[in-house]
Image: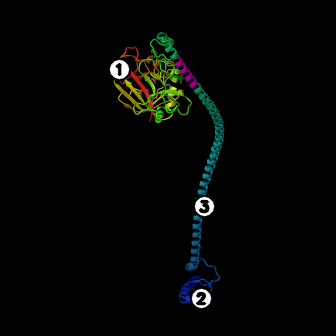
Amino acid sequence: MDSTLTISLSLFLILCVDTSKVGGQKEGAKQSSRSSDSKAGRCSYTFIVPQQKLSGALCLNTPSSLPNGSEVAALRAELQQQQEQLEKLQLQLEQTGSLAIEVRALRKESNSMNSRIAQLYAQLLQEVIHKKDQALEQQRVESLLLNATTQALQVSSNYRELEKKYGALTSMMSLQNQFISKLEKQCQCRDSRSQVMTDPTKSQLNEHHNYSSDANKMTNDVQRDQSAASPLQEKTGGVSLGAPTNTPFVNLPVTKSPGPWRDCQHVLDSGETTSGIYLLRPLNTNLLLQAWCEQSRDLGGWTVIQRRQDGSVNFFRTWEQYKQGFGNLNGEYWLGLEHLYWVTKQAKYKLLVALEDWQGRHVFAEYDSFHLEPESDWYRLRLGQYHGNAGDSLSWHNNKAFTTLDRDKDSYTGNCAQYQKGGWWYHMCAHSNLNGVWYRGGHYRSIYQDGVYWAEFHGGSYSLKKVSMMIKPT
């Protein structure tokens, strides 16, 4: 009975399921019109179960539920919105990150700008303080300049007064000379006249003899100063203004203007074409000096700074003498290192060295630039390029300090001025020595090369007959 009931129940269930499938296919249109609460493909089942306990498994075969298309579409739309929102969030995140990087860069730049502004502020403050100091210094310099200007005006007025006194004395001396000449003519006594003219010369020779004896105490072999300068000779800057003659004053050439001039080129430009002694005053200084202007050589305008021709002047001198100058402007002389410094400071000058041997041969050496450094640098020599036919014996001395017997500034272990018997821009020691001993005849015998020589012209054991150094603006 139980088995029969079980089989019938199974058949009923199978039939019910199949019927529901067939009915679902035939009546699909009717089922679509049903309410939304009842889902498609579902049916209700009625089970008749006897009131007895069943044993074993009860199987039920039902079809799986199909997904709803609208829900899938809704889910897809929501998923698309969520993806779009996610993309927007990612874009905002990227923008926020770039903004953060830019903000950090701006903060760093702001910090650097703040430090730069602080640095500029400190510099500006320092410049303000420096300008205040400069203003105070400028006021001090202006006061000094005013004082110097007043002193210069006072010196100028004193100089004019001295010029007037000098003119008066000159006129008085000329009158006295005329009166003496008249007395001599009246006396007609040649012996007395010769006695009057020679006595001063003897006293002058005695003075130079004393100087030579003093110089001999410093060295055994020095130059002989044979010049006999008159004690009435005037001196400007240490250079003797008169020649070793009986007349007490130098006969200056008659000029269109009394000067002073800047240099001999300025004299030539002023229309003075006569070679002779002229009064010079370089620019930016109240220093007055006289120099020989050579107007007949190479278009003129040459300021002679050194001349050797007869051995009449002793060139074995001290630093102070080489600084201020010495000798006779009509013969052998040295212009002076200080005067030479101020003259060459005005413009660019060139140097001409003219040489003559004892056979009458003339050669020259020219340098396209020439000037001296101040005394604080020991009047160091500055030379340019060489041109000429005498050979270059001076470039070896370029950039060397000046050395004298009492100021040893050369590169040698000893004092070159002691061996060479003169002041020069010695190195170790010399390729040229135009301020050495003037030996007659050319070749000489001496322990040292102390003659007036130019090594590239006859060597160091040949003393030249005539030499001269002269400068001119380029």
Q: Position of residue 124 (x, y in %)?
A: 64, 45
Disc 1 marks which residue?
A: 358
Sequence-wise first label, 1 or 2: 2
Q: CA distance from mark 1 to mark 2?
A: 152 Å
Q: Position of residue 209 (x, y in %)?
A: 49, 11
- Element on which disc 3 rests: helix
Most extreme residue toward the front is 186
- Element on which disc 1 rests: loop
How crowded is the residue under tag 1: few (<14 C-alpha within 10 Å), some, or many (20+)? some
| Three-letter code for the amino acid on which mark 1 is drawn | Trp
Q: Position of residue 169 (x, y in %)?
A: 57, 22
Q: Please report contact status of discs 3 and 1: CB closer than 8 Å, yes or no.
A: no
Which one is in front, 96 or 203? Answer: 203
| Three-letter code for the amino acid on which mark 2 is drawn | Ser
How crowded is the residue under tag 3: few (<14 C-alpha within 10 Å), some, or many (20+)? few
| Three-letter code for the amino acid on which mark 3 is drawn | Thr
- Element on which disc 2 rests: loop
Left-right relation of 396 to 142: left
Q: Main secondary structure of the magenta part?
A: helix
Disc 2 marks which residue?
A: 33
Q: Position of residue 431 (x, y in %)?
A: 40, 23
Count of numbered circles in the view: 3
Give the residues in magenta: 166-180
Between disc 1 and disc 2, the foreground one is 1
Sequence-wise first label, 3 or 1: 3
As for residue 171 lying within the magenta part, the answer is: yes
Against 9, is 205 above or below?
A: above
As for residue 320 lying within the magenta part, the answer is: no
Placement of the N terminus among the 4 image quadrants: bottom right
Where residue 96 is drawn, which disc sits there? 3
